Amino acid sequence: MQPPTVERRLWALPLAGALLVALPVFLQAPWVRLAPFSAALFTAALLMVGVVLAHRRSPAWTTAGVLLVGFSGSWLGGCLFWGWFRLHPLWHLPIEAFALPLAVAGLRGRWRLAGSFYLASLAGTACTDAVMALTGVMQRWTQVLEAPLDQAALELQRAALGVLEPLPLLATVAAACLLIQQCRRFWHHPDPAWRLAASAIATTLAVDGLFLAAALWAPQLSGLI
């Protein structure tokens, strides 16, 4: 059995990763809707704080700083898409992947956790977009975003109901099961970067589930419209 301090450290990193995945849903989305330029500029503050903390002597602060650097990449990608390209769903993944080469390169050095978080978040985005395309939600994307508020809520609810049809529902459940199985494998890996990735992907899955539930029962509160 591991000492309590070690156990807390093992859980602290995944919890921080989960928080940073969920945070944009509640903070970034409304901010980008109201002021996309300032939301994008906030990336510089995130990056600056992350780099400063990453050079602290305390291992805890160093880890927090490295993780914040990875989060800044995801934050900027989200701001760029939702601020200026939200009507073009096929551009979602390419825009979010703008820092992919840097993240891959970072896996080999001190920025390993930053790269791991960014890549896991990107993988979650890719899975979400793939399921949306398979279930037909992607085809309604532009209709939902361009419609007046009341009509947009109705369109979003129709898209969500389409996911509950047999074949789309089967694809959704199968994708969720595969992701959960993969997360379990990552979670038991001895490298903390893999546990961080598991936490980020699992949180993305949970957020997607909440979004689907909101689209079904309260589409006006879903955050998309």
Image (tube, rainbow, N blue to C red):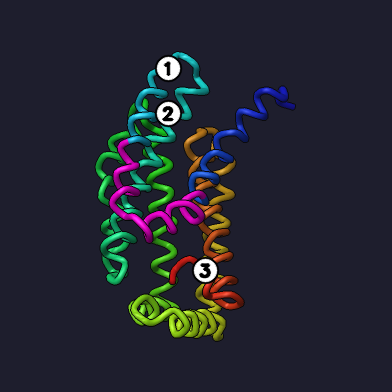
- For the residues labelled 2 and 1, say whether their Cβ atoms are less than 8 Å apart: yes
Image quarter of the C terminus: bottom left
Name the main secondary structure of what is drawn in magenta. Answer: helix
Magenta region: 23-44
- For the residues labelled 1 and 3, say whether their Cβ atoms are less than 8 Å apart: no
For mark 2, give the secondary structure. helix
Q: Position of residue 67 (x, y in %)?
A: 44, 34
Label 3: how many residues lie within 10 Å, few (<14), some (14-19) or many (20+)? some
| In-image side of 80 versus 75 (left or right) | left
Checking the image for residue 222, the label placed there is 3
Residue at the image position 39 percent from the left and 68 percent from the top = 130
Vertical relation: 185 (above or below) 222: above
Residue nearest the observer in this picture, 125 or 85: 85
Checking the image for residue 65, the label placed there is 2
Q: Tell me the amino acid under the disc marked 1.
A: Arg
Vertical relation: 180 (above or below) 59: below
Q: Tell me the amino acid under the disc marked 3.
A: Ser
For mark 3, give the secondary structure. loop
Marks 1, 3: nearer the viewer: 3
Q: Position of residue 205 (x, y in %)?
A: 53, 59
Marks 3, 2: nearer the viewer: 3
Label 1: how many residues lie within 10 Å, few (<14), some (14-19) or many (20+)? few
Magenta stretch encompasses residue 24: yes
Residue at the image position 31 percent from the left and 62 percent from the top = 92
Label 2: how many residues lie within 10 Å, few (<14), some (14-19) or many (20+)? many
